[in-house]
Image: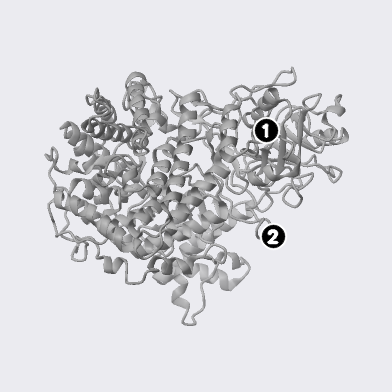
């Protein structure tokens, strides 16, 4: 996310408006001085341990990259649970997430410069040859302009940058003749039609073969795009122009940035999340540093670093001042409204803001960088990974973690800026957690739910492009890298662009002619690197002194941010009315509502805050009766707990959150639907029975397998191809009768997750699983006395290598019973909902508490009938009855129009945020 080495935040002075050659040279000197100042103040990690950790990163990369090349290439990405490639159109649609896939071997291109950073030059040369031989950009597929730019165009340019570097060294790539650059130029021209708008902002999507608006293109009707989507083009497009001499790319990217700058909210100097590409009107008027805006700010500062254009620094400094004034509430970074920046727009943060401490290092603002990074690290220590979103009191809001690299990135740049070995220990923790919780036989799997430890069949290309690059550089000494990393800047996808581009093909006017800066006071803008005496006072424990107050911020926290306006009441005035205290029968409360928005600015802010709380309270009430997802963990050889499947819970039977997990071998029941007395009770006696969904109620299935002696049950969906990746989970309800007689635990798996167990049975015959509320620690599983008789590897590395050698072939679903399965394919255009759970289950110890549900959890009273949270029941099958009348769901609180007529716009905005997805 920030410049390689973090040079601008390290303590050297650069003459104001200095020539960029001097700026670049001084930036490298900055890092040297800052590192020497800081490393003298703390005992560094031994070189032996750093080398050991660096080698561990190399082995992890080999595991991920090798499995992609073996099981997925030339597909765009690896599906690590089923050991196959993800090909657009051949898997159920995941919505916008799939817009990154363009049938252009995405992971290979995204990994090119990582191979060189990790000293794998021979593999890099082979990879470049494969790209030139196999990759086709003339594909009839609609892709994200933003993702294609940062991953594919950036990957090609990063690969080209290091290819010409290696060629100059004289050992590798002697045959190379700018072939990657020509591919990048071809791709650039394919993206240009997206800019055919009156504003200059690009369409969010484009067809690589047919462009925009043509009937064959299937795109071009969109009206909105995110700020980051339109504002994260300048580095790649300018580099393409500077490399090739074709100025059109840089011109288009500059025009988009100019338009965004002109449309900023002038009183707050903030930008919104989503903008209309034709009119320039803000569609979403909340502003932060996370999803939807993040890399816009990043590219303003880095465009100044790479291109030497003062106007980009002026813009960044203006925005940064507004961020620190309104959004930054150390250690939190909370979204606000652009037109009312003193009012917070939400009470949760998304994980993408983890890049911001790294950007602050580049800016030179170290203290808040340390504070926010430490807060994020405390969240990671609580949940093992950074959840996609978490609340101001550090509970899980969205539970997924797709192995994002932003926190590792900030860790690297803080270490480079401070030299504090504390950040090496942080990196070590990241390595341990990845190996412990995300590593699977075919790579590394994203976390479906950080609370349960369940996996998602997903390994995004950015994991190889960024995570391993930053972790390796964190532990590498200068002599461990075959080139000088200080000569390059990192793009938002961690691709490397050489700083010498600042003096190449500079035909673009440096000063923006469409924007006026006369109204801005830049007298306080930093035109120099900060002094080391300011960044690092003569206290050897400077960084530690900043971190120390935050050590317990997660475990001993109270919600922050939403109470900003209450600070004005500390003098003794009556505090404002809170949504949780409101009573419609209280005349005083009604009178307060009537005053909101009419008397003063404070009343207006009270009103907006009240409506936000009311909407969140309504959402919370809807979730009170829901159960959290469960986990099915395969613990037998060769898995040893590495594969964790997300399972739906049941409203009957043994509650796994209150009792010890259930462990046992699995066996298929006969009949497979479990709707009558089992004919193979001896096969399921003392085991966990596998049964198929359909033809009778869940409770009836549970009773039949319990009567046969089963100790638990797993219901597998009968809709072939269904997956928790694309469909919301649901909980199995009872049959409207007393279900206290059911004593065994029951869990539900979609077809794809169920096929993993079925394929494991086919290949290994005996498969043992663990049914629990959250995944169990793998080390504990291996140490379990019951596992001592298993054929275990002699060491961790042996374990990993053996598990790779004995990888399952899980590409096909196995039906153990010959019976027809009703077809009900998933809608190919369905988009996954984001879990938004924030409430913890009552009755659990603090260490065991997990949020009560996810936002997309459904409930069923009959086997096959689901009712989602929006009270929109799916079509019932002919053999099913109405939902359990005992299961009730809260309804949204309706606004009092006569009192709150002035708040319609803000209510709509809050509701949009509530449904907002990363």
Q: Compared to 141, does 53 lie above or below?
A: below
For the residues bearing labels 1 and 2, Cβ distance under 8 angstroms: no
Element at badge 1? loop
Percent position (x, y) of residue 825?
60, 25
Residue 39 point in image, percent of width and height = 35, 61
Residue in the picture at 32% in, 72% down:
538
Which numbered circle lies on residue 907?
none
Q: Residue at x 63, y 39 (%)?
A: 729
Expressed as whole percent of the image width and height from the top left, the position of residue 114 reads: 37, 37
Q: Nearer the viewer, residue 796 or 622?
A: 796
Q: Is residue 590 above or below residue 122?
A: below
| Residue name at image x 54 percent, y 70 percent | 577
Q: How many marks?
A: 2
Q: Nearer the viewer, mark 1 or mark 2?
A: 1
Q: Which residue is mark 1?
A: 637
Callout 2: SS:
loop
Q: Quadrant of residue 177?
A: top left
Q: Is residue 863 visible?
A: no
Give the mark nearest the N terminus, 1 or 2.
1
Residue with the mark numbered 2: 845
Q: Residues within 10 Å of mark 1 (few under 14, many from 20)?
A: some
Q: Which of the two residues, 467 or 670, is positioned nearer the viewer here?
A: 467
Q: Quadrant of residue 668?
A: top right
For residue 844, above or below residue 477: below
In depth, the one of 222 and 401 nearer the eye is 401
């Amino acid at each position: 996310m920030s410049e390689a080495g973090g040079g601008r935040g390290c303590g050297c002075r650069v003459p104001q408006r200095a020539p960029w050659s001097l700026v670049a040279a001084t930036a490298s000197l900055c890092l040297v001085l800052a590192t020497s100042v800081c490393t003298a103040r703390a005992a560094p990690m031994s070189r032996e341990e750093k080398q050991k950790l660096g080698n561990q990163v190399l082995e992890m990369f080999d595991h991920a990259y090798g499995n992609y090349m073996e099981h997925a290439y030339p597909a765009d990405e690896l599906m690590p649970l089923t050991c196959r490639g993800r090909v657009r159109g051949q898997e159920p649609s995941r919505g916008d997430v799939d817009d990154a896939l363009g049938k252009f071997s995405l992971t290979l291109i995204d990994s090119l410069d990582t191979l060189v950073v990790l000293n794998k030059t021979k593999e890099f040369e082979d990879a470049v040859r494969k790209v030139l031989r196999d990759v086709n950009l003339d594909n009839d597929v609609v892709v994200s302009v933003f993702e294609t730019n940062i991953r594919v165009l950036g990957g090609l340019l990063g690969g080209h940058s290091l290819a010409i570097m290696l060629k100059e060294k004289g050992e590798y790539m002697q045959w190379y003749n700018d072939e990657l650059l020509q591919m990048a130029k071809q791709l650039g021209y394919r993206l240009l039609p997206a800019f055919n708008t009156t504003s200059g902002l690009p369409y969010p999507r484009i067809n690589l073969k047919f462009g925009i608006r043509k009937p064959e293109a299937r795109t071009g009707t969109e009206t909105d795009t995110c700020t980051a989507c339109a504002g994260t083009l300048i580095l790649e497009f300018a580099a393409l122009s500077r490399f090739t001499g074709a100025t059109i790319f840089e011109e288009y990217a500059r025009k988009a940035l100019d338009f965004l700058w002109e449309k900023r909210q002038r009183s707050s100097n903030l930008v919104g999340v989503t903008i209309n590409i034709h009119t320039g009107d803000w569609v979403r008027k909340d502003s932060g540093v996370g999803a939807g805006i993040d890399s816009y700010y990043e590219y303003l500062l880095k465009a100044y670093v790479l291109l030497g254009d003062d106007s980009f620094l002026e813009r960044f400094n203006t925005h940064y001042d507004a961020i620190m004034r309104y959004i930054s509430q150390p250690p939190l970074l909370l979204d606000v409204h652009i037109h009312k920046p003193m009012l917070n727009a939400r009470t949760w943060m998304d994980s993408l803001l983890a890049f911001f401490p790294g950007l602050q290092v580049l800016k030179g603002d170290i203290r808040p960088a340390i504070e926010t990074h430490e807060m994020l690290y405390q969240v990671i220590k609580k949940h093992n990974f950074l959840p996609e979103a978490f609340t101001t009191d550090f509970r899980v809001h969205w539970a997924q973690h797709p192995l994002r690299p932003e926190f590792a990135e900030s860790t690297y740049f803080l270490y480079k800026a401070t030299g504090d070995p504390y950040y090496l220990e942080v990196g070590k923790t990241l390595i341990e957690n990845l190996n412990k919780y995300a590593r699977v036989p075919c790579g590394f799997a994203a976390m479906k739910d950080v609370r349960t430890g369940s996996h998602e069949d997903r390994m995004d290309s950015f994991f190889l492009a960024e995570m391993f690059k930053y972790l390796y550089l964190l532990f590498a000494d200068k002599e461990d890298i075959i080139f000088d990393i200080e000569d390059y800047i990192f793009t938002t996808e961690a691709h490397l662009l050489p700083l010498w581009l600042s003096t190449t093909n500079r035909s673009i006017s440096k000063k923006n002619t469409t924007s006026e800066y006369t109204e801005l006071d830049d007298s306080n803008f930093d035109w120099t690197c900060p002094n080391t005496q300011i960044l690092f006072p003569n206290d050897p424990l400077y960084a530690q002194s900043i971190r120390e107050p935050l050590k317990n911020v997660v475990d001993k926290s109270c919600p922050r941010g939403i109470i900003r306006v209450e600070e004005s009441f500390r003098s003794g005035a009556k505090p404002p009315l809170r949504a949780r205290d409101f009573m419609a029968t209280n005349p005083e409360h009604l009178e307060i509502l009537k005053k909101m928005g009419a008397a003063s600015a404070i009343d207006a802010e009270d009103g907006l805050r009240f409506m936000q709380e009311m909407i969140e309270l309504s959402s919370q009430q809807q979730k009170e009766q829901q159960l959290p997802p469960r986990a099915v963990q395969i613990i037998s050889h060769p898995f040893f707990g590495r594969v964790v499947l997300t399972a739906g819970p049941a409203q009957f039977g043994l509650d796994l959150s209150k009792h010890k997990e259930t462990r046992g071998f699995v066996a298929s029941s006969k009949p497979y639907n479990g709707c009558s007395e089992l004919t193979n009770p001896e096969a399921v006696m003392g085991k966990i029975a596998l049964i198929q969904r359909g033809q009778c109620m869940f409770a009836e299935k549970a009773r039949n397998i319990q009567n046969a002696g089963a100790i638990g049950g797993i219901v597998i969906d009968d809709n072939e191809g269904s997956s928790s990746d694309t469909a919301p989970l649901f909980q199995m309800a009872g049959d409207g009768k007393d279900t206290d007689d059911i004593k065994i635990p029951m869990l539900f798996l979609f077809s794809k997750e169920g096929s993993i167990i079925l394929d494991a049975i086919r290949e290994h015959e005996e498969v043992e699983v663990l049914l629990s509320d959250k995944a169990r620690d793998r080390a504990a599983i291996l140490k379990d006395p019951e596992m001592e008789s298993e054929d275990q590897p002699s060491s961790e590395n042996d374990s990993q290598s053996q598990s790779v050698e004995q990888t399952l072939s899980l590409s096909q679903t196995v039906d153990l019973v010959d019976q027809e399965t009703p077809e009900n394919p998933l809608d190919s255009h369905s988009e996954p909902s984001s879990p938004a759970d924030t409430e913890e289950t009552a009755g659990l110890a603090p260490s065991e508490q997990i949020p009560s549900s996810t936002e997309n959890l459904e409930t069923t009273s009959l086997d096959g009938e689901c009712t989602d949270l929006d009270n929109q029941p799916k079509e019932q099958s002919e053999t099913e009855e109405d939902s359990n009348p005992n299961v009730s769901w809260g309804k949204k609180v309706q606004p009092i129009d006569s009192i709150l007529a002035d708040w319609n716009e803000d209510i709509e905005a809050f509701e949009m945020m509530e449904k907002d997805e990363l």
